[in-house]
Amino acid sequence: MEEKRNDRRMGLSAKLLIKNMNDGETQAEEVTIDVLDVSKSGVGFICDTPLEIGAVYETQLKIWTDEIIHAFLKVVRIEQTKDERYICGTIFIGLPEMNAKRIEVYEMLGRINNEEV
């Protein structure tokens, strides 16, 4: 997938639980996804469930400090893999500044660690 973010990406081994916020008729279904990367602008992940481009999903993102960030993600890109999984690119919708700063601090620490290597 082509890089389109302006913010530096960082990988986490966390999981997200999501539900589609655009469809009020269906029951909320929690789906565990594998996070590939997180930046203060969005999240990249792989999931087994086909999602919709433009749809907004509610998330509970477990970050590196074991804190949970409640956020909304809008799907902007989807790529299907050979093994019937989906690589999704999303952007945060209305992420509180405090949570964006948490991600930004981790991003800065990652840059410092990379310079020391």
Image (cartoon, rainbow, N blue to C red):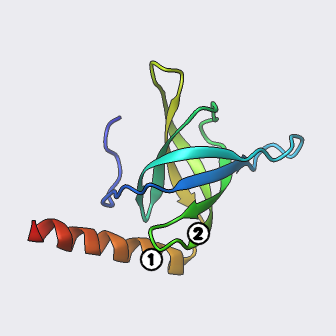
* Residue 54 sits above or below residue 74 on the image: above
Residue 32, quarter of the rendered image = top right
Q: Are marks 1 and 2 in contact (CB under 8 Å)?
A: yes
* Front residue (pair 29, 52): 29
The image quarter in which residue 109 lies: bottom left
In the rendered image, which residue does mark 1 sit on?
Answer: 102
N-terminal of the pair, mark 1 or mark 2, is 2
For residue 35, the mark is none
In this rendering, the answer to whether 53 lies above or below 85 is: below
Q: Quadrant of residue 73?
A: bottom right
Question: Residue farthest to the bottom?
Answer: 98
Q: Position of residue 82 (x, y in %)?
A: 45, 18
Q: CA distance from mark 1 to mark 2?
A: 10 Å
- For mark 1, does the 10 Å Cα neighbourhood hold few (<14), some (14 to 19), or many (20 or more) residues? some
Residue 70 in the image: x percent, y percent? 64, 67
Residue type at mark 1? Arg
User: Which quarter of the figure is the C terminus placed in?
Assistant: bottom left
Checking the image for residue 69, the label placed there is 2
Name the residue located 86 percent from the left edge and 44 percent from the top edge: 27
